Amino acid sequence: MTFYYQTSSWSSQPQVTQETIDLWKHVADKSNWRIVQLPNGFYQTEYQDHVKEDTWNDVTRRETLEGAEQAIDSSIAHYAKKLEYINGPKIVKTFK
């Protein structure tokens, strides 16, 4: 599942706008997602727009309800990870 957004180029730390950070925070919350069944029997994942709350943005279509929910969970994990690394690399080991 992929969201497209525009950023500026950078040479070291990512320069992410506050608008992008707000979107990532919004889509990292499962309560902002839903699954609808389409007339052809497929399931469509949608997230509620973080600016216009009465608008839902479609993201993916899956054959099963379980597949759709797994796609949402994968997206949430992806954007939670992006939010974790906004402030720089994570230190995993130091040496003395």
Image (spheres, rainbow, N blue to C red):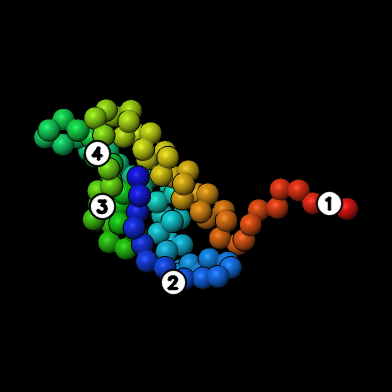
Gap in angstroms between the C-alphas marked 4 and 3: 12 Å
Disc nearest the viewer among 1 and 3: 1
Say which amino acid is labelled 1: Phe
Gap in angstroms between the C-alphas marked 1 and 3: 47 Å
Q: Which mark is residue 61?
A: 4
Gap in angstroms between the C-alphas marked 1 and 4: 47 Å
User: Which of the 4 image quarters holds residue 4?
Assistant: bottom left
Give the labeled residue for mark 3: 57
Gap in angstroms between the C-alphas marked 2 and 3: 24 Å
Say which amino acid is labelled 4: Arg
Q: Earlier in the sequence, mark 1 or mark 4?
A: 4
Residue 63 higher or lower than 32, as above or below: above
Gap in angstroms between the C-alphas marked 2 and 1: 34 Å
Residue at x-position 53% and y-position 49%: 81
Give the labeled residue for mark 2: 8
Q: What secondary structure is marked by label 1?
A: loop
Q: What secondary structure is marked by label 3?
A: strand
Task: Please state the horizontal and vertical placement of residue 10, each as a whole percent of the image.
Answer: 51, 70
Disc nearest the viewer among 1 and 4: 1
The mark total stands at 4
Say which amino acid is labelled 3: Asn
Q: Which mark is residue 95?
A: 1
User: Which of the 4 image quarters holds residue 87?
Assistant: bottom right
Task: Please state the horizontal and vertical placement of residue 5, each as a whole percent of the image.
Answer: 36, 62
Residue at x-position 27% and y-position 61%: 52
Residue that lies at the very extreme toward the front in this rendered image = 11
**Classed neighbour count for the residue bearing mark 3: other residues with Cα under 10 Å, few (<14), some (14–19), many (≥20):** few
Q: Nearer the viewer, residue 14 or 52?
A: 14
Disc nearest the viewer among 4 and 2: 2
